[in-house]
Amino acid sequence: MSLSHVLLSSGRSIELTELRMSSTYGGMLEGYPCKRINDMKVSGLKRQGERDFPSTPFHLVPPSREYPDQTAGAFGPVEVLPSVACIGVFRSTAVAPQADPVLHRSVLTVAWFQPGQDVPSGEDADPALRGVRWEELAKDYEL
């Protein structure tokens, strides 16, 4: 069962079969969001996705970063990532044109950050997520 379908910018429809969401800054007890903290958050999400889904190819969508306050504190300027960190497993039709469409599908695990808790769907999904280069990144498998 798919949780939703996302229409990529390329026109390919992909289905979301598993989704994990967490607060980007959940559990942050001290300090403030800055480049160093955010780099750790991004690399931690990447490691988690690669560790939790080792049998599928993995892609991290580079997150947007905002700078709401230009005054620098002890750790540099405030830098804010979108508030929700996501890891999703997506499936679609096979990438290879010679693959049997009945027996083959393609898969890709994607990590991204988004501003809200909504499940990505259709053309309303985050533009960076919709821009994933499926044909280059996904792997075909046999059912």
Image (spheres, rainbow, N blue to C red):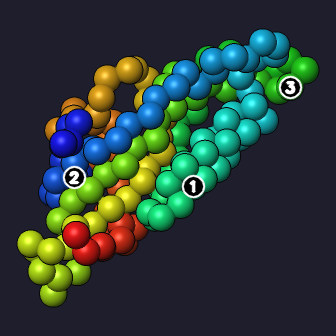
Residue 33: image quadrant is top right
| Residue 42 vs residue 72, the one in the foreground | 42
- Residue at 19% from the left image edge and 73% from the top image edge: 104
Q: Would residue 73 be found to the left or right of residue 131 on screen? A: right
Q: Classify 10 Å Cα crowding around label 2: few (below 14), some (14-19), many (20 and above).
A: many
Whether residue 139 is visible here, answered yes or no, is: yes
Q: Position of residue 26 (x, y in %)?
A: 63, 18
| Residue 54, x across and y down, in percent | 53, 60
Question: Which quadrant is home to the C terminus?
Answer: bottom left
Occupied quadrant, residue 2: top left
Image spot of residue 109 (x, y percent): 42, 54
**Dot 1, crowdedness within 10 Å: few (<14), some or many (≥20)?**
many
Q: Secondary structure at mark 1?
A: helix
Q: Which residue is mark 1?
A: 50
Q: Are marks 1 and 2 in contact (CB under 8 Å)?
A: no
The answer to which of marks 1 and 2 sits earlier in the sequence is 2
Q: Which residue is mark 3?
A: 75
Report the mark closest to the observer, 3 or 2.
2
CA separation, marks 3 and 2?
Answer: 40 Å
What residue appears at the point 16 percent right and 53 percent down from the top-left corner? 13
What amino acid is labelled 2 in the image? Ile
In the picture of the structure, the residue carrying the numbered disc 2 is 14
Residue 66 appearing in the image: no
